[in-house]
Amino acid sequence: MKIILSNASSDPIYIQIMNQIRQSILSGELRAGDSLPSIRQLAKDLQVSVITTKRAYEELENEKLIDSVVGKGCFVSGANKDFIREQLMKRLEEKMMNIIRESKELNMSQQDVIDHLTLLFEEEQTP
C-alpha cells in the first residue's frame, strides 16, 4: 500500500490518508485480516503528525473498514462486506454511465450496447 499526500489538495491530510486506505480496501489491494502499519510508523513514513494518522485510522474504524486490536495493531476488517460491495457497485455504475454517454456519442442504440456487452462478456468467459 502506497500513500501519496498532496499539498495542492483541498482535502486535509487525514482525509487523504483515509481515502487512499479505503480505496486500497475497496480495490482488493488490502484484504480482510491484512495488517496496516502502526499509527506511529505511518506517521513517520508520511512525515506527518501521529494525531493525523490516528484520526484517519479512527475514521476508518468508525466505517468498520478496519479493526484496532490493543497491543496488536490495526487490521482490515472483514465485517463490512456490504459496504465494500456497495462502494464497488457505485464505481461500476459510474463506469457504466461513461459507457452510456460514449455510446450515445456513437449513436448506438441501447440494444447495440447490450449486444456488444454480451459479446464481450461471453468472450471473457471462454478460456
Image (cartoon, rainbow, N blue to C red):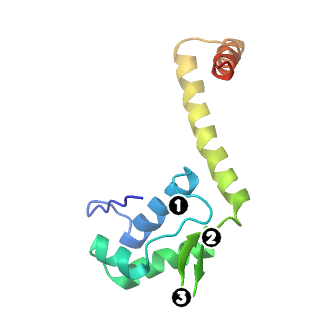
Q: Residue at x 64, y 68 (%)?
A: 77
Q: Nearer the viewer, residue 33 or 105?
A: 33
Q: Mark 3: which amino acid?
A: Gly
**For marks 1 and 3 on the same chain, the one whose residue lies earlier in the sequence:** 1
Q: Residue at x 63, y 22 (%)?
A: 124
Query: How far apart in space, not on screen, are marks 1 and 3 (Cα)?
Result: 23 Å
Q: Mark 2: which amino acid?
A: Glu
Q: Residue at x 52, y 17 (%)?
A: 105
Q: In the picture provided, is 24 more to the left or to the right than 81?
A: left
Q: Is residue 67 above or below residue 125?
A: below
Q: Nearer the viewer, residue 58 or 125?
A: 125
Q: In the picture provided, is 7 more to the left or to the right than 25?
A: left
* Label annotation for residue 71: 3
How busy is the neighbourhood of tag 1: few (under 14 within 10 Å), some, or many (20 plus)? some
Q: Position of residue 88 (x, y in %)?
A: 63, 47
Q: Quadrant of residue 7?
A: bottom left
Q: Do labels 1 and 2 touch, CB within 8 Å?
A: yes
Q: Which residue is mark 1?
A: 22
Q: Residue at x 61, y 12 (%)?
A: 108
Provide the secondary structure element on which disc 1 rests.
helix
Q: Position of residue 72 (x, y in %)?
A: 54, 83
**For marks 3 and 2 on the same chain, the one whose residue lies earlier in the sequence:** 2
**For marks 1 and 2 on the same chain, the one whose residue lies earlier in the sequence:** 1
